[in-house]
Image (cartoon, grey):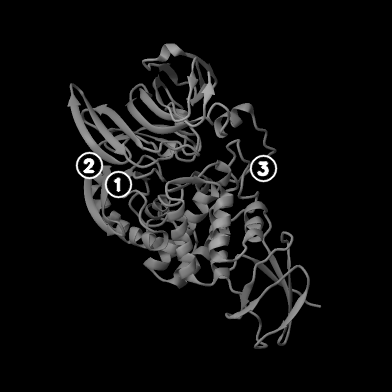
Amino acid sequence: MKTIFFLLIGLTSVLQAQTFTKADSLKNSDNVYRDFWDVKKYEITVEPNFDRKTVSGTNTIYFEITKAVNDPTFQIDLQQPMNFKIISDDAQTFATTRDGDFIFIKAKKKYQKGELHSFTIQYSGAPKIAKNAPWDGGWVFTEDQNGNPWMSVAQEGIGASVWLPVKDLWSDEPDQGMVMKIITPKNLVGVGNGRLIAATEEMEKKTFTWEVKNPINAYSIVPNVGKYVNFKDTFTGEKGKLDLDYWVLDYNLNKAQKQFQQVKPMLSAFEYWFGPYPFYEDSYKIVESPYLGMEHQSAVAYGNHFENGYLGRDLSGTGVGLHWDFIIVHESGHEWFANNITAKDRADMWIHESFTCYSETLFTEKYMNKAAADQYVQGLRHNILNDRPIIGTYGVGEEGSGDMYYKGANMLHTIRQVINDDEKFRQILRGLNRDFYHQTVTGAQIEQYISSKSGIDFTTIFDQYLRTTKIPVLEYIQKGKSFTFRYQDVVPNFHLPIRVNKNQLICPGEKWQTVQLKSSTPVIVDANYYINYQEQHR
């Protein structure tokens, strides 16, 4: 969710010609060093050291060979200045080299399709420190208000390889999940993703073992260490009893017990719109974090100061967003769009952010009413920059414009108006989460799915809003009941029927056309369509 916050704190984007490097391609594409093996599971140990600002541990990467290869080279990602050592039993059969942020493991044997293998990699060092998490990625070593160490990492943009040796590629999640052991001083608590399956103490240290049974995107794998206390609840949802698990700093317990009462209405709304919470096996969890928030799977990072809105502000400027906690709603929406359905490539990050930004509107509709939801999503438009296309460049780690949030949400709201059947729209959203359950996908797949399930070809609408910076302009002339109109600033053959005067449907094109209105009163264009309109006089 980091891009949204660059915009919200008033930073102005500077557009420059982007030059991509070999390293960009190595990190962000399914290249020849990655395309023959599939990660099955991670087994991680991690021990952050507060005084030294270092992190150390091991990662055993279990994988399956997906096609026969002779003497292949495996790419493992680990960003400098982190150090590593291969400690697998058969390490002698490998020749290991390092090139910048990449470890290349040259195997000296033949692999057959379907074989299962593993690497165990020891890592240590002083990882990059985030200057302004979560917008600037890296580790956070800070203190809580009582002077206790508080540690975590923000890594959606920079990648989990900022500290952990992994296959740092969005399109390859560990199918069988992971186990993470967090080692802490005995007076602190380590909180990770999934469920706590063991907690042991030895000498001056504790080890907290967390297990995730479902596939998980690498940037969601996050250890948290602090003076945490825990409280629990349950939610009766579409798949039965969902365990709710909350970890907050000890002095914030009372605030959290009150504020987190919003979780059940949120889950109820999202299960209505999107289908069952995707990770019942791993529980739903909120972990208080030393930064604003992030969508870590089954361990939502929370730093919104236990108040409604976005740090007490309403992003829509309408007042509607002050009725609920932005971080609880937005970051939890990502459990469906980002964690359940994950983009294969960062260029399609709109799959995560457009749907999740719109989840705020859908939540508002269930929590409050439809009028408030419409007001909210329309209010978000004042944040849209139209600086560059929402879709970025594929294969090099370039995400598109931050407009993937507000403009993307308004695109989906516009598509909903065209479908003009809220139940059908809801079933499409639920179908996405069912048919792409725990999968990585392309933007093209999502576009085609919506067109197919709705029975409406939305190709030009997706092209207009995702691939250009132009907003359709409806030009019109009204003379009594005579209404003449056309679209300007649109892609070729743009097709977006719209309603005027509440219930009259028109189908503008790029050529002028005229219809007769039912009334001679000044025409009103439905504000739920994200278009501009201009009355012409001639």
Q: Is residue 227 above or below residue 515?
A: above
The location of residue 387, given as percent across then percent down, is 65, 50
Q: Return the residue at label 2.
A: 229
Residue drawn 51% across the image and 24% down it = 75
Q: Is residue 456 left or right of residue 183?
A: right
Tell me the element at label 3. Answer: loop
- Label 2 sits on what residue type? Val
Nearer the observer, disc 1 or disc 3? 1
Tell me the element at label 2. Answer: strand
Spatial separation of the CA atoms under disc 2 and disc 1: 22 Å
Residue neighbourhood size for the residue with mark 2, other residues' Cα within 10 Å, grouped as few (<14), some (14–19), many (≥20): some
Foreground residue, 167 or 233? 167
Q: Is residue 216 left or right of residue 409?
A: left
Identity of the residue furthest to the right in this view: 538
Tally of numbered tags = 3
Would you say residue 526 is visible in this rendering? yes
Q: Earlier along the polypeptide chain: callout 3 or callout 2? A: 3
Residue drawn 59% across the image and 39% down it = 398
Spatial separation of the CA atoms under disc 1 and disc 3: 44 Å
- Label 3 sits on what residue type? Leu
Q: Earlier along the polypeptide chain: callout 1 or callout 3? A: 3
- Label 1 sits on what residue type? Glu
**Residue 86, quarter of picture:** top left
Q: Return the residue at label 3.
A: 15
Tell me the element at label 1. Answer: helix
Q: Is residue 272 above or below residue 252?
A: below
Residue neighbourhood size for the residue with mark 3, other residues' Cα within 10 Å, grouped as few (<14), some (14–19), many (≥20): few
Spatial separation of the CA atoms under disc 3 and disc 2: 45 Å
Q: Which mark is residue 281?
A: 1
